Amino acid sequence: MTQSVLKACLVGATGRMGTELRTAARQRSDLIFERGLAENRSDPSDQFDGLPVTNDPEKAVQGVDVVIDFSAPEATLETLQVAADESIPFVTGTTGFDDSERQRLDDFAQSIPLLKAANFSIGINVLKKLTRLTSDALSDDFDIEIFEAHHRNKTDAPSGTAKQLGRAASDGQQSQLKETAVWTRHGDTGDRSDKEIGFQVLRGGDIKGEHTVYFCGAGERIELTHRAGTRQIFADGAIDAAVWLTDRPPGLYGMDDLLF
Ligand code: NAD
């Protein structure tokens, strides 16, 4: 029996992650990219590294089994609209959505299987679990802070992953991140409160992604760190997610559903 090969559309085909995904797909026998979507493209026969790439979502998703998206919120939502109309499962790793855009993602997930992950690495998903567990186990005497570092071209801050780690930490201490998050500190800040969760951001060079969750007590400190050495881990995780997603009913999924 021959294994079926999924035909996929790559949204963000010309970007950093697009490049990793094209490379990752060449190593696999279960998924191929048929077409891509990116900015500043016009004709679908316009080839980019051997892939026809267009800026028209309708042309990009035509006839594919699944969409994999690493682009920008505007491109994600525009392509999702077309994918939902055509009942095509959709995997997105794009970050930087605001509240109303997140709501729109939830709405689309009522009609198609949609898997959304701010980070497709297995290590980060385990780190989220450890963060929740550690936060749950410690008392309010431990102050929680989250540090993240990324390359100089990342356009949103803090990273979607840092916010997810913040959510895991606040779940553990039974609080709401929107009430406890401190996004910046500058000037006369006064004392730190017990439940606040502070975020620190570094941008520079070609850092692929680093995240540390600090639990700072009196006389002791726990640091949970993940460092991405290559973007390939995100690309492999996203393709695994796409293969997994195509058999699912409509709904909003995350990497937790795939991994645990
Ligand atoms: P990039 O800037 O290198 O590439 C962006 C791509 O999206 C390009 O191909 C660009 O043409 C396309 N694009 C942007 N706006 C568009 C529009 N309006 N219409 C059509 N195409 C458009 O970015 P990147 O480093 O590849 O990251 C892309 C996204 O993936 C970011 O949101 C980033 O935070 C996220 N990311 C997620 C993970 C993860 O594991 N979830 C890992 C790395 C990056």
Image: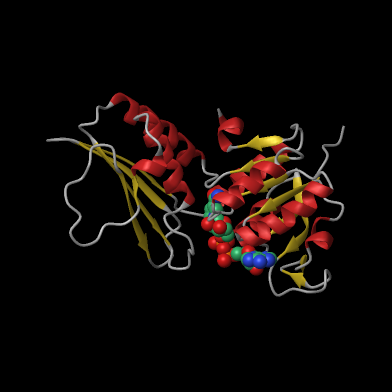
Residue 63: percent from the left, percent from the top? 87, 52
State left or right for residue 177 relative to residue 219.
Answer: right
Q: Quadrant of residue 158?
A: bottom left
Q: Residue extending furthest top?
A: 137
The residue sitting at 83% across, 69% down in the picture is 44
State left or right for residue 246 relative to residue 139.
Answer: right
Q: Nearer the viewer, residue 197 or 24?
A: 197
Q: Quadrant of residue 29?
A: top right
- Ligand 1 placement by image quarter: bottom right
State left or right for residue 58 relative to residue 159.
Answer: right
Q: Is residue 93 visible?
A: no
Quadrant that contains the C terminus: top right
Relative height, residue 37 to residue 166 (above, below): below
Residue 204: percent from the left, percent from the top? 38, 66
The residue sitting at 40% across, 37% down in the picture is 176
Residue 20: percent from the left, percent from the top? 60, 57
